[in-house]
Image (tube, rainbow, N blue to C red):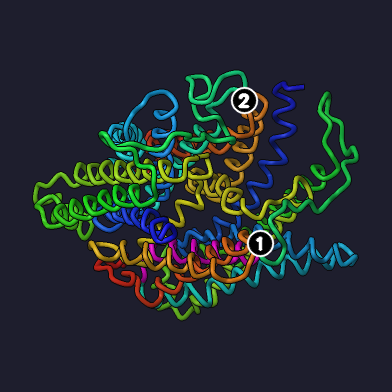
Amino acid sequence: MTYAMHLAVYFSVYATLALSLNLIVGYAGLLTLAHAGYFALGAYTYAIASLHAELGLGTSILLAASVSVVASVLLTLPIQRLKGDSFVLLSLAAQIWIVTLLQNWWSPDAAPGTWRNLTNGSFGLTVERSPSLLWFNLDTHGELAFVAGAVAVAAAVMVSRLQNSPWGRLLKAARDDETCARGLGKNTRAAQAQALTIGCALAAIAGTLYAAYVGFVDAKTASLDESIMMLSFVLIGGVGNFRGPIIGAVALLTIGELLRLADLPGSTVGTIRLLAYGALMVVMMHVRPQGIAGEYRFN
Amino acid sequence: MGGPLDALARGVPEGLQIAVLALAFWITYSATRVIHLALGAIFVIAPLVMSLWLQAALSTIPGVLISMIAGTLISLGCEVLNHRRLETRRASWAVHLASSLGIYVSLVQVAVLVGGNETRQLHQSVSEGLVLGSTVLAQGEVMSVVISVAVIAGTALWLRSSNLALRLRALGDNSRELSIQGLNTNALRCWAFGISGLLCAAGSLTRGFDVGTDPQKGLVSLMPAMVAVFVGKDLGFAGVIFVGIALGVVRSTVVLVASAQWQEAVTFGVLMIFLLTRSQIALGTSRAASR
């Protein structure tokens, strides 16, 4: 039962993450490699908040989303000038800057979580108390799985409603033929910037839940490898609709869990898992560029 | 120690290594518009092959040749098995990029399974090579400078004198017209990828002999080269080399002033400043603005 709840938490966190990335890649048509950075910002915000204040999970989620929205300026401001491969480079730059900040905002002389040692560098931050929501302490895996599941469902409903709204149609129009959409008087860049901001905030919320569950966060959470793994969720599952990212998250988490059943050392399992993700990305680009259940082809 | 001369003495060898990798990336990008991220995997695999060769107590020169052939073949494989097929279906740049990223991830994991996760140092000796004022360059650094300069000079000569280089430039400008003229564009693409793999293997070996290569940092090591290409490409070969060397000096200055952990952030800062202001600055102004 505990293992099932563990899987439920992981699935909910990654489904939220995949849905947020789908908003950016699938609807706005912007290929980003910075998503792990925003996920990590959420995780760090929760960890730092829990070190200082008796903040509940709900307040931490709001705080993490706000921090991520502010940090998303790194991507949204230059979007007026950068498109295509230049935007990929911009996202790579944002990712590098976030990781560098997380690795370097530390001092051996100060306590972790203080202004001088905010992130504790490569040692990371440990969350010692269990998360709480309103008047409840989320002590068991089941309770946290319920909250994470509720957040994932809320994210899914939100993305689904956005998809069918005029704003969602504007995003799709901008993705498919930006010149035409702009010719019709639509502010496509503003819509893309909004999608980026919402996507980054959702990633931070997923990061908060991750930190609340795992109880530890370090700069590796924001690494480029993590961003590539997140991208593989949506590229394999499919983008441009609501089902694809969820299917991608389920499929890739299942591969990871099945590999754990094999009698192999943990590091080898991790290596084979990444090998499988990479190979699947290549195969999908050849066989189904829109992913298993996606609607939008990068073509 | 720690002065401008030191930054220059440490930065130029690193900059030359970046320039060699940038050439590898630039040749594919300028000829085919493919962002060949799988070069990051070649950067990991070529030193691994060399290291396994040396572990078997075999001589160095054949090992270097075999590592470079391995790099070339992997890059060719990327074109023949992946990019050419995608190109036939007129896949977008994003599909090429995503598939190249997938190849990179897979190949690096294969390299980790074969050779482990530890950093591979191909040259164990730290004997003194050259003294420049207060700066002492190790033998590995001097060797890396000599090899990098030779590779860059060889590539420059090839670009100036060879008909193939001219055709590769034409391929980048208008591949359809080249095809109509009766030239085999598939073969030209293979040349671009093959040369790119060869140069990347050469760059990774110089890095491996100098400071060693980490299997998990293939793409990270390729990033400064990508930055050099995107900043310097409008000025062609000279621009890419110049920016590569300048980035090396900037990165070594960052190490002296702050710490090595800020290198990538500063490198990408340079790229962003360039990308956001490129129509206003001197480097490639007219062509960049007109595009």
Kind of residue indicated by mark 1: Val
Q: Which chain carries label 2?
A: B
Residue A196 on image: x %, y % = 28, 45
Which chain does tag 1 point to? B
Mark 1 element type: helix
Q: Which of A207 and A159 is in front in this view?
A: A207
Report x, y in % for residue B138. 84, 39
| Residue A226 can be seen, yes or no | yes
Report the magenta residues as a range.
B91-112
Along the viewing direction, whichever of A154 and A276 lies nearer the viewer: A154
- Number of labels in the image equals 2
Q: Quadrant of the C terminus of chain A?
A: bottom left
The relative height of residue A5 versus residue A221 in the rendered view (above or below) is below
Q: Position of residue A197 (x, y in %)?
A: 27, 41
Residue to which mark 1 is pinned:
B112
Residue A5 versus residue A151 in the image, above or below: below
- Residue indicated by mark 2: B258
- The local crowd at label 2, few if under 14, some if 14 to 19, many if 20 or more residues have their Cα within 10 Å, is few
Q: Measured along the vertical axis of the image, is residue B4 above or below residue B243?
A: above
Q: Which amino acid does label 2 sit on?
A: Ala
In front: B71, or A113? A113
